[in-house]
Amino acid sequence: MSGHATPIPMTARASGPLNGVAEVPGDKSISHRSLILGALSVGETRISGLLEGQDVLDTAAAMRAFGATVERVGDGEWRIRGVGVGGFCEPDNVIDCGNAGTGVRLIMGAMATTPITATFSGDASLRSRPMGRITDPLALFGARAYGRRGGRLPLTIVGAADPVPVRYVSPVPSAQVKSAVLLAGLNAPGETVLIEAEATRDHTERMLAGFGASIFTEITPEGRVITLRGQPELRPQAIAVPRDPSSAAFPVAAALIVEGSDVLVPNIGLNPTRAGLFDTLREMGADLVFENPREEGGEPVADLRVRFSPTLRGIEVPPERAASMIDEYPILSVVAAFAEGTTIMRGVKELRVKESDRIDAMARGLEALGVRVEEDADTLIVHGMGPGGVPGGATCETRLDHRIAMSFLCLGMASKRPVSLDDGGPVATSFPGFEGLMAGLGATISRDEG
Ligand code: S3P
């Protein structure tokens, strides 16, 4: 689906204490990978807890187009009959990945070493995002890409007929680039090696190992060196998708800034390559307690108890933490607005090429809501106004970006005056039950007349 048709204006108002249990949806990164790896296995993969947001539904449709049988059998319960590594058939129409950068980039990798041709497109946000970071390494395998200026979508990939394995040093800290290379390496003979200077989320490596691929990671002075042996037979799996820490971030942040709140977020994924936000919030003085730490499906999980934290203080977030919380800077900048002092976020230029330019989207929105910010190409600085100190009282642009939308709605639950969005529709890409879940905790969010 290429974007929702009609904008959905929304408003969040000062809310009573948030209380209760926040059952956030399944992890988006793991959901995409479950469908793609299920489609590349021989036999039936069973998934529970799949995120049924539009991004992931678009990946499910894409896997069908490449020949896998994909069935929804219950809430979050899915079955996939895969076609095996190298078994993708040529789709007979354009693959529409909607808003999903992860979907399109991983799928391009997964098909690039099979001798088929596929054309990819998406919504206005996805069509504006750089794809050269994916098509450059895929060319080394022997795939060819024909896109719009700057390698943008719509883009056609002609898969390599005789793929060769690749050794690739990723020039950007991106799990999507890493994953595209590893998925392409699956159907190349011999060993594909991916080197990343900074650790990015490692779900692809963990899940490939779970599906039976030979893959190992060495920590060297050059960075993480990941070696994958090509042309394995992937074995179908039963996958229980943990809840998404990036989605949990929204009720967690709202509880921290809304007076009197006390919220439990059960069963959230705490993979260390994803959990940087929680370290940062604790350094700011947030009242977070992890209960029942355990391992589920190869991923660490725990229940997170969060309480209103009236003495948050601004900090400098270490830039080396950026990859482990890259999707959480928008909501962190909201929490920072309610802290005392200044929060400095450096090393965040990747935010400029997400679903929107997230530095610009947050800076403009926060300014409109009465918060002082500074920015440069790679930095966002928020000058906190203390608990209850943010004026609010403006309409923010969401720019087809779900995380920008949810961040400003959370801000509006604690600001003096309401916060409106031009379009809350993008929330459904990653967190379809967001409004209901937040209302259940005590938040006041309304849909406005268009
Ligand atoms: C993702 C990787 C990140 C992240 C995105 C999900 C993934 O993107 O922002 O939401 O599932 O691999 P980059 O790899 O481009 O940083």
Image: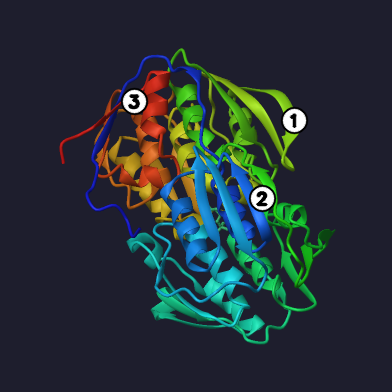
Residue at which label 1 appears: 294
Q: Please, what is the three-letter code of the amino acid marked with disc 3?
A: Ser
* Residue shown at 44% from the left, 57% from the top: 58
Residue at which label 2 appears: 320
Q: Which of marks 1 and 2 is nearer the N terminus?
A: 1
* Placement of 45 over or under 226, stated as above or below: above
Q: Please, what is the three-letter code of the amino acid marked with disc 1?
A: Arg
Q: From the viewer's perspective, is the residue at label 1 or at label 2 nearer?
A: 1
Query: Which class describes the residues within 10 Å of circle 3: few (<14), some (14-19), or many (20+)?
Result: many
Question: Hey, which quadrant is residue 215 in on the image?
Answer: bottom right
* Placement of 357 over or under 143, stated as above or below: above
Please state if 326 lies on the left or on the right of 192 as rendered: left
Question: Residue 293: percent from the left, percent from the top?
Answer: 73, 27
Please state if 389 lies on the left or on the right of 42 as rendered: left
How far apart marks 1 and 3 lie (CA) works out to 36 Å
Observer able to see residue 98: yes
- Does mark 1's beta carbon lie closer than 8 Å to ligand 1? no
Question: Residue 295: percent from the left, percent from the top?
Answer: 75, 35
Please state if 52 lies on the left or on the right of 321 as rendered: left
Residue at which label 3 appears: 415
Query: Which class describes the residues within 10 Å of circle 2: few (<14), some (14-19), or many (20+)?
Result: few
Q: Element type at marker 1?
A: strand
Query: Which class describes the residues within 10 Å of circle 1: few (<14), some (14-19), or many (20+)?
Result: few
Q: Please, what is the three-letter code of the amino acid marked with disc 2?
A: Glu
* Residue shown at 47% from the left, 44% from the top: 52
Q: Which of marks 3 and 2 is nearer the N terminus?
A: 2
Question: Residue 314: percent from the left, percent from the top?
Answer: 53, 32
Question: Residue 287: percent from the left, percent from the top?
Answer: 59, 20
How far apart marks 3 and 2 lie (CA) works out to 31 Å
Q: Quick one: quadrant of the C terminus? A: top left
